[in-house]
Structure formats: structure tokens, C-alpha cells
Amino acid sequence: MAQFHIYPNPGTKTAEIPYLVAIQNDHITSRTGATVVIPLRAGAQPVEIMAPLVEVPGQGLFVLSTDEIFAIDTARLKLPVGMLSPADRARIKPAVDKVIGEY
């Protein structure tokens, strides 16, 4: 399981959330059997910083739905469909900081 890999959503809401992107570092994932993911929403409106558009290679643009971050058992994730580009990876930390930051 590699950080920034994109996986098909194994859940039931695949029309709205077709993909999940793993954001947890490999060092932690290899020890816990779970990984932190952010849903990639289809047809949603992006929100500056918190929910930017990111590209799933060969599939188009999706909204990084950072406010829906969660952990999932790695056994539920099947073969990745791609990996986020370096530019899209750089959008994750500011998005997470926006969600959990102090106001």
C-alpha cells in the first residue's frame, strides 16, 4: 500500500465517491493494517483549499473531499487505479490543515 495511490471505493456510494486516495505514510500503514484515506467525489463543487480538484489518471477530475477523511482496513482496498501527481499531492496538507486548523 503506497501513499498517494488511488483505489476504487469498496463501499456502497460508488456513484458519488468512486475513488479513495491513501494519504497515510507507508511506515504507519505497514504496522497498523489500516490507512487514512480521503474520498474523491464525482460531480461535487470544489472549495478553495479544503476541497480542491485532483486528477485521477485516465478518469478525469474529482473533488478531494477532505472533510470526509477516514481510516479503512487495507484489506478492503484492491488494486490501485493510479497515483496522484506531485502537484495534486501538494494540495493535501493545506486541505487537511484547513479542516483541522484553529479558527
Image: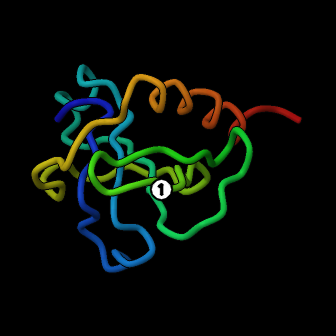
Residue found at x 33% / y 41%:
22
At 10% from the left and 50% from the top, the residue drawn is 79
**Outermost residue toward the right in this view:** 103
Q: Amino acid at mark 1?
A: Phe
The residue lying at 33 percent from left, 59 percent from top is 19
Quadrant of the rendered image containing residue 83:
top left
Q: Position of residue 46 (x, y in %)?
A: 66, 55
Quadrant in which the N terminus appears:
top left
Picture quarter with the C terminus? top right
18 displayed left or right of 33: right
Please state if 12 lies on the left or on the right of 50 as rendered: left
Q: Secondary structure at mark 1?
A: strand
Residue at the (70%, 38%) spot, across then down: 49
- The residue under label 1 is 62
- Residue 85, compared with residue 14, is above or below; it is above
Place of residue 78 in the rendered image (x, y in percent of width and height, measured from the top left): 12, 55
Mark 1 neighbour density, 10 Å: few (under 14) some (14–19) many (20 or more): many
Q: Quadrant of residue 8?
A: bottom left
Tell me: 49 left or right of 85: right
Colour scheme employed for the rendering of this structure: rainbow
In percent of width and height, residue 27 lies at 24, 20
